[in-house]
Amino acid sequence: MSGPLALGIFLVAFFFIATEKADKVKVVLIAAGLMAVLGLVPGSEVFFSEHEGIDWNVIFLLFGMMVIVGVVRQTGVFDYLGIWAAKRSRGKPYRLMVLLMAITALASPLLDNVTIIMLVVPVTVVVCNRLRIPAQPYIIAEVLASNIGGAATLIGDPPNIIIGSRAGLSFTDFLVHMAPPVVVIFVVFTLFTKILFRKEFRYNPEHVAAVMALQERRAITDPRLFVRCMLVLAGVVVAFGLHAVVHIEPSVVALVGAGVMLVVSKVDAAEVLAGIEWPTLVFFMGLFVMVAGLVHTGVIAAIGDWAIAAVGDDFLAAATALLFGSSVLGAFFDNIPYVATMAPVVEGLVAEAPDPATGQALWWAFALGADFGGNGTAVAASANVVAIGIAARTGHRISFWRFTKYGIVVTLLSTALAWVYVWLRYF
């Protein structure tokens, strides 16, 4: 009876999260509390068990990167890049879009796509207001670019952090296996945007002078702080890449990097900590407890057994199902809870693989599908929700359908290209 009860609590909570009918943090806290009170999670072990409880590697990696970004934000580097892009484009809409997408896609693998969106979108709004053009197309393009670019690394997209921790995959593993298709897909996407947004492009030459008059150098108010922060950030990225050599967990690297960043920057630690996305961290913790209830009561094992029986020995079919299934489901549900739920199932499938290479191929198919599915609808990824919220507050409302009509096309394109990559490289 415990299995159906745990599944019922999870499905009800998932419904409220997916439909946004209630605050997702409140939902996961109530659901996690019910799991604990009804004995559906393994007691206090939920705080200590890696596979049946809160994954602290994920939580502290996110926390450390949030601190690092909180300090980097104060350097004004993203204001600088936004103004630079506007001036380099000379107000030409397609050129401006490409430059803003490139900035977003290149930064997302290093600082996670949700944070990058929080930094880039406000700058985009300022630039578009100066040019007297609608900001919505540029914001949508940036979000799509951030979800594509963030897929390239362990820390670029929250689902990757969950998958990396569960599968024992390093920063280098993600870079070697995920970056190649991401680069190709981003280039194709960049070319495709000229067609996709062709009806949205507007050019007002009379307002270009207002943008050309902006001084990007003024955005960097403290050059010494900027240099120190960039050096620490570079050190953190190098340490992520050396994981296989030094065997230090990415979460530890992020925490040490955050501490060093606070020390060398001499900023007010309390101010930086006040800017941490605490609701996001609490959401993750509650979500892990919910999934622990499914694992502890045998629901995940039952789903895994069914999946193994359905796949049999055809692991290309398994990879295809994971890729397209994750893309479709991830498009209609937030890809973070989806990945947290499905990761134990994929782990079971991987255990049945004939060799480690085939097993890893399943993880990569799962990651690609979940990451690219995040572009499918307005609620498919946290970056989408954050961007739409910022746009609404600045007077550039983006409706669910307006985002989704572009997102679905990009998801189909990127998933199809990802399948070709998985087939050619692993099978």
Image: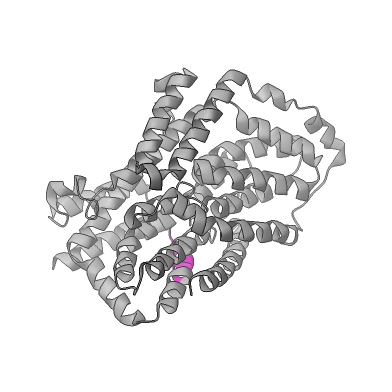
Left or right: residue 376 compared with residue 161: right
Quarter containing the N terminus: bottom left
- Image coordinates for residue 98, horizontal then vertical, percent: 71, 49
Establish if 383 lies above or below 400.
Answer: above
| Spot occupied by residue 218 in the image (x, y as percentages of width and height) | 69, 22
The question of residue 326 being in magenta is answered with yes
Residue 279 in sight:
no
Q: In this view, does 29 lie above or below 352?
A: above
288 and 248: which is toward the camera: 248
Q: Is residue 300 left or right of residue 271?
A: left
Q: Going 18% across and 60% down the picture, which residue do you hit?
A: 296
Magenta-colored segment: predominant secondary structure: helix
> What percent of the width, then of the height, locates residue 179?
55, 55
Q: Does 121 sit above or below residue 316? A: above
**In percent of the image, x 51 and y 33: which residue is there?**
233
- Seen at 50% across and 44% down, the residue is 114
Which of the pair 280/71 is nearer the observer? 71
- Front-lying residue, 61 or 268: 61
Residue 195, quarter of picture? bottom right
Residue 250 is one of the magenta-drawn residues: no
Q: For residue 224, which quarter of the picture?
A: top right
Q: Which residue is drawn at 35% across and 37% down?
A: 252
Quadrant hosting residue 86: top right
Question: Which sits in the foreground, 356 or 372?
Answer: 356
Which x, y percent locates residue 65? Answer: 44, 37
Rendered view: 300 above or below 268: below
Residues shaded magenta? 325-334
Q: Taking 330 as reference, is 83 left or right? A: right
